[in-house]
Image (spheres, rainbow, N blue to C red):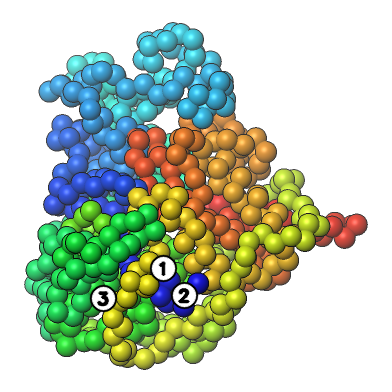
């Protein structure tokens, strides 16, 4: 294997959202595929549906006066995941949708991933069958839920889940509950979890909400000046220039190299990859950046991911990684514009464009690259100094969040005595962030490109590169038997949460299985692209870090998703070691 920074040489496409969720062509109408979810702006929503969402927001207060923070991006996020905004169906002036939208029949047959029998409650009135129950309409209500929640929004005196306005109002009322404050992230997550009891579903919907929220913001650069404005103007001037694998640099767009893991080549395309674009834009401001995304993260003042995207300022670099906190796994970089948006060279087959910052999973912080003229907050400066001072120690025990209380009588994972290796783990040492303000630019070579992390849509051809990169950036620190047991459990938990398959094995993790009305993701295209099990701050805590791909309920396929499952170790009276999974919050 080549040197680790070469392994992450050319920036690739970004993962989806923590979701979740996906690349977005903000306000450009740009559509793409190959593992990147389409949409994310009002432009991808049928106008009649968008009107219904906005009207529902205005009407919801009549039924739930204590509800705060309801807004159309929330309803759009739900409808995107549930039915892709009813795209492909006709929507009449009064809001009626035809043909009607039906979910899979929930008869426990396993079709579509359903494993729970739901007896018929409406005699087929809404779901068209008396042989069982199935979700209906653009918001996929269960008939029994609709009977208690549905309202007439269009004035025809019929509360119909197959009507866009009625369904949107019903969804708004349902999400508001008895008076939630949806401006608070915790209450918004609780509302979405009520809609579908799957943490992966919640992450996916939140990703779309963030995208639509960013898309609704108007970009305002009137107060941006100096080098930051020069960088932004240079980047914006390249909108529409094609993505080229290995292309671009300080002098502008150039022909790239061959090839990505699945054979995508930039050799015949004059354009930019993500790091080529940032290198060009910063050069216009007289700032030298290295040629690869992971190296660019070591330039200038680092902005910790823990501060969130709100700490970013226009002109900052924005980084994404398959294992945030491990800079060698950084595979993508963009330039922040403000209002939750960035200039982005996304992946092969796209052009330089505007994307939502929160549209990508694996946010790994940012960097001022020593050019921001406005002072940062004292808290940011203090945290940054501390991080740089103890970088090596911090990376040896990178945190993955606070563990929730262990559930009572949770299923356990017993470590085996098999001494065979889980994988051929790489011997690379842990990375140490650079404190250097400038760096010597490195010209990309074909070998660097060939070893790069794969872009979206690579399929299984890129999975090995992802796995090797994770192992190299985060060396093994658990006994082989524990690692094997944890990986087996982590993979099974992810599959259960995302597809519904195997949930019965983990009742205290997922709660009442009856709450999982329908799988959040289909089993057909679900696959795990990479997985590692490592200590999580102490010998008795561990995390299984997974990168995966899947198709959601609305039919949108995305890859490079990121999920962590946390475990705690207990020792039995006989000295056996068991690992207990913790519920995700």
Residue assigned mark 1:
451
Whole-number angstrom distance, CA of label 1 to CA of label 3: 27 Å
| Residue 355, placed above or below residue 192 | below
Whole-number angstrom distance, CA of label 1 to CA of label 2: 7 Å
Tell me the element at label 3. Answer: loop
Q: Earlier in the sequence, mark 1 or mark 2?
A: 2
Residue 406 visible:
no
On the image, which quarter does residue 294 sit in? bottom left
Q: Residue at x 63, y 61 (%)?
A: 423
Residue 526 visible:
yes
Mark 3 Cα-neighbour bin, 10 Å: few <14, some 14–19, many ≥20: many
- The reply, left or right, for residue 19 in relation to residue 110 is left
Q: Earlier in the sequence, mark 1 or mark 3?
A: 3
- The reply, left or right, for residue 367 in relation to residue 120 is left
Q: Earlier in the sequence, mark 3 or mark 2?
A: 2
Name the front one of labels 1 and 3: 1
Residue assigned mark 2:
2
Residue 568 percent coordinates (x, y): 69, 59
| Residue 119, placed above or below residue 360 | above
Residue 276 percent coordinates (x, y): 24, 73
Residue 99 percent coordinates (x, y): 25, 18
Q: Residue at x 48, y 41 (%)?
A: 526
Disc marking residue 316:
3
On the image, which quarter does residue 545 sit in? bottom right
On the image, which quarter does residue 233 sit in? bottom left
Mark 1 Cα-neighbour bin, 10 Å: few <14, some 14–19, many ≥20: many
Say whether marks 1 and 2 touch (CB < 8 Å): yes
Residue 518 percent coordinates (x, y): 48, 30
Disc marking residue 62:
none
């Amino acid at each position: 294997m080549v040197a680790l920074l070469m392994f992450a040489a050319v920036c690739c496409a970004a993962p989806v959202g923590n979701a979740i969720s996906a690349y977005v062509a903000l306000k450009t109408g740009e559509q793409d595929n190959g593992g990147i979810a389409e949409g994310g702006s009002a432009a991808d929503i049928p106008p009649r549906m968008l009107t219904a969402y906005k009207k529902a927001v205005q009407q919801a207060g009549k039924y739930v006066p204590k509800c705060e923070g309801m807004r159309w991006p929330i309803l759009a996020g739900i409808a995107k995941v549930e039915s892709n905004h009813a795209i492909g169906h006709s929507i009449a002036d009064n809001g009626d949708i035809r043909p009607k939208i039906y979910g899979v029949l929930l008869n426990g047959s396993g079709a579509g991933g359903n494993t729970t029998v739901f007896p018929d409650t409406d005699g087929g009135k809404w779901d068209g069958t008396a042989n069982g129950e199935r979700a209906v309409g653009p918001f996929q209500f269960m008939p029994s839920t609709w009977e208690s929640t549905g309202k007439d929004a269009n004035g025809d005196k019929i509360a119909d889940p197959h009507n866009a306005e009625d369904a949107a109002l019903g969804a708004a009322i349902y999400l508001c509950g008895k008076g939630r404050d949806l401006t608070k992230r915790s209450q918004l997550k609780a509302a979405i979890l009520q809609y579908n009891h799957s943490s992966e579903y919640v992450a996916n919907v939140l990703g779309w909400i963030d995208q639509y929220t960013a898309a609704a913001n108007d970009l305002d650069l009137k107060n941006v000046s100096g080098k930051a404005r020069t960088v932004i103007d240079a980047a914006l001037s390249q909108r529409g220039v094609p993505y080229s694998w290995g292309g671009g640099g300080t002098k502008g767009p150039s022909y790239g190299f061959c090839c990505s893991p699945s054979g995508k080549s930039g050799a015949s395309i004059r354009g930019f990859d993500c790091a080529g674009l940032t290198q060009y834009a910063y050069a216009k401001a007289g700032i030298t950046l290295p040629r690869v995304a992971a190296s660019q993260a070591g330039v200038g003042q680092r902005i910790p991911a823990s501060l969130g995207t709100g700490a970013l300022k226009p002109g900052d670099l924005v980084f994404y990684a398959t294992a945030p906190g491990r800079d060698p796994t950084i595979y993508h970089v963009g330039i922040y514009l403000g209002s939750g948006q960035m200039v982005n060279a996304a992946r092969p087959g796209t052009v330089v464009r505007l994307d939502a910052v929160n549209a990508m999973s694996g946010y790994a912080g940012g960097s001022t690259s020593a050019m921001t003229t406005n002072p940062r907050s004292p808290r940011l400066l203090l945290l940054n100094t501390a991080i740089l001072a103890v970088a090596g120690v911090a990376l040896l025990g990178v945190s993955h969040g606070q563990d929730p209380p262990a559930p009572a009588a949770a299923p356990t994972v017993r470590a085996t005595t098999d001494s065979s290796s889980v994988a051929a783990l790489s011997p690379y040492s842990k990375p140490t962030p650079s404190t250097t303000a400038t760096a010597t630019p490195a010209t990309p070579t074909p070998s660097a490109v060939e070893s790069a992390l794969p872009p979206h849509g690579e399929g299984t051809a890129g999975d090995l590169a992802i796995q090797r990169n994770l192992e190299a950036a985060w060396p093994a620190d658990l006994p082989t038997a524990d690692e094997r047991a944890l990986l087996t459990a982590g993979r099974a938990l992810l599959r259960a949460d995302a597809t519904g398959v195997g949930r019965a094995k983990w009742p205290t993790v997922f709660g009442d299985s009856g709450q999982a009305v329908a799988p959040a993701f289909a089993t057909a295209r679900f696959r795990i692209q990479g997985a590692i099990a490592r200590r999580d701050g102490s010998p008795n805590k561990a995390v299984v870090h997974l990168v995966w791909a899947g198709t959601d309920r609305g039919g949108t396929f995305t890859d490079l998703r990121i999920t962590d499952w946390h475990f705690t170790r207990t020792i039995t009276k006989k000295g056996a070691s068991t690992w207990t999974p913790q519920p995700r919050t």
